[in-house]
Image (cartoon, rainbow, N blue to C red):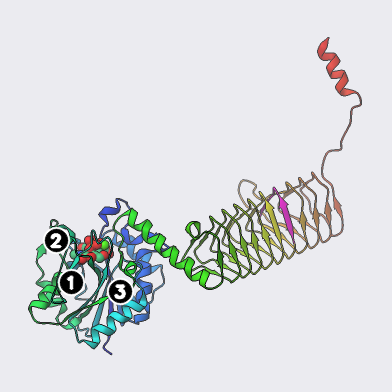
Amino acid sequence: MSARHVIVLAAGKGTRMRAARPKVLHRIGGHPLVGHVLDAAAPLRAVTTTVIVGHQAEAVEAAVRGLGHPRLRFVRQEPQAGTAHALLQAEGALAGARGTLVVLSGDAPLIRSATLAQLVEHHEEHGAAATVVTAMLERPYGYGRVVRLDGALVRVVEEADASPEQRRIREVNAGIYAFDLAPLFGALLAVPEAGPKHERYLPAVLSRYRRRGLTVETVTAADAREVRGVNSQAELAELGSVMRQQKNAELMASGVTIEDPATTYIDRDVTVGPDTVIHPGVTLEGRTAVGARCELRSGVRIADSTLGDDVTVNDCSVVVRCEVAAGARVGPFAHLRPESALGAGARVGAFVEVKKSTLGAGAKANHLSYLGDATLEAGVNVGAGTITCNYDGEAKHPTTIREGAFIGSGTELVAPVTVGRGAYVAAGSCITEDVPDGALGVARGRQANKDGWAARRKRDGES
Ligand code: UD1
Ligand code: CA
C-alpha cells in the first residue's frame, strides 16, 4: 500500500449560489459541505490532508479548523483560475511526497467513505496514473460528461463546451479522483486555459494522460446520488433532503418510529434510541442524543441536547443545550433555554420558559412560568404564573428553592432569594427575603371587601 494524501478543493466562490457565504460553508445535515467531505475522507488515514482555499480564504480556513480534523494544512489559490490551477497550488505543500493523492470537491458532500476506499483500491491495483469517480445521473445537466471510446475514458467535456450530442451523455465526472503523485504536478503545469472563463480544468489531465499512454481508470459509484455537487441554492436543498432521507432511513432501521419522514428534520450526528416515536414536523439538531421510548410530538425543535429514556416532549416545544433526564415531560409550548437540566420525572408544562436553571427529580412547573438562574431541588412544586425576577437591570441573580418546597401560583421571587426545605409560599406573594425551612412565606396586601359598593356606584352614576 502506498502512502495516501488528500486534497479538498474549496477555493471557488460559488457564484451560482448568489450568496455572500462561501459555497463550501453552506450547511446540510448540521455541517458545512466541506465538513462532510473531510469526514468522508477521514478513514483513508492520509499522511497529509490539504484544503485549497481562496475565495474568503480566512473565513473558510477558520470554519474548517473549527471542525476539529487533526493535522490539516491550508494552501491559498489566488486568483481562482480553475480546478487544475487549484490543485497545482499544493505542489509546494506536497514536495517530495509520493504515492496516491485523493482529490475531492469541497462542494460534493454526499460521497461515502466506502466509495473512496474503493477508488483508492482500484487505482492502486491497476497501477493507474489517474482514476476518476463517475456516476450515471438521470439529470446530468451542469456536470462534466465522460466521453468514452471502446469503453475507455477519452476525456471529460464540461457542460459549457459540450456538443448537443455530448450533453445527452448521462455518465458524469464526480470531480473526485485518485492520482499517482509522480507525474501529476508536471502534467498540471501543462494544462491550458479553456472554456468561457479561461480556467484550467483538472479533467484535462485525464485526456493528456491517455494521449501519453498512461493508465486512466474509472470507478462508478453504486449510488449515483453520492456524487452530486452543490452549485445552486436549489441543489443545496435537494442534497439536504437526500441526506435527511438517509438519516431517517438509518434511524427507522434501528427501531425508531418516524410518522412522517418527509417532515422530519434530523441532523447527521443526532442519535435516537429504539421505540422512540417522532411525530410530524420535528427538528433534531447538532449533537442531540434522544433516549429510547421517548415521544416527540409535532413542532418540537431540540438542539444540542441530551434526553434520557421515556421522555415526552409535547407539541411546539423548543429545547436548546439542555439535559433532560429519564421520564421527564416537557410542554406543550415550553421553552428550555441553554444550560438547563431537568431531573428524572420532572415536568415543565405549557408556556413555561426555563433559562440556565435546574429542576431536581420530580420537580414541577406546569403552567405559565419563567424560571431563570434558578435551582429547584427534588419534589419542588411551582404554581401557575410564578416568575423569578432574576435580573436587576445590571446583573443576574440566583433563586434557590429547596427540596419539597411549594410555591403558590402567581408568585414573584425577587433574586437573590432562597425558599427553604419544605417551605410554602402563599399564592400571589412577592418574595424579596429568604423563606426559612418549613415556614410559610406570605408577601401580599390584605384583601378588603367593601359591602354594597357595586350598588352605590350604580346609584351615584345615575344621579
Ligand atoms: C467540476 C468538474 C466537472 C464535474 C463537477 C462535479 C472541472 C473543470 N469540472 O465542475 O467535470 O462534473 O465538478 O461536481 O473541474 N475550485 C477551486 N478553485 C477554482 C475552481 C474551483 O478550488 O479555481 C473548487 C470549488 O470550490 C469546488 C470544486 O473546486 O469545491 C469544483 O468547482 P466547481 O466550480 O463547482 O466545478 P463544477 O463546475 O461543478
Ligand atoms: Ca461543483
The kind of residue tagged 2 is: Glu
Q: Which image quarter is the N terminus in?
A: bottom left
The kind of residue tagged 3 is: Ala
Which residue does the image show at 34% across and 71% down from the upper left? 223
In-image side of 263 versus 181 (left or right): right
Q: Which image quarter is the C terminus in?
A: top right
Of callouts 2 and 3, the N-terminal one? 2
Q: Which mark is residue 88?
A: 1
Q: Which residues are magenta?
A: 363-372
The residue beneath circle 3 is 221
- Quadrant in which residue 197 is drawn: bottom left
Of callouts 1 and 3, the N-terminal one? 1
- Quadrant in which residue 26 is drawn: bottom left
Nearer to us: label 1 or label 3: 3
- Name above or below for residue 125 compared with residue 345: below
The x and y percentages for residue 107 are 31, 64
Which residue does the image show at 36% across and 68% down from the upper left? 110
Q: Circle 3 — which element?
A: loop
Q: Is residue 54 visible?
A: no
Disc 1 residue: CB within 8 Å of ligand 1? no
- Name above or below for residue 85 compared with residue 183: above
Looking at this view, name the residue that lies furthest to the top. 463
The residue beneath circle 2 is 165
In-image side of 175 versus 335 (left or right): left
Q: Circle 2 — which element?
A: helix
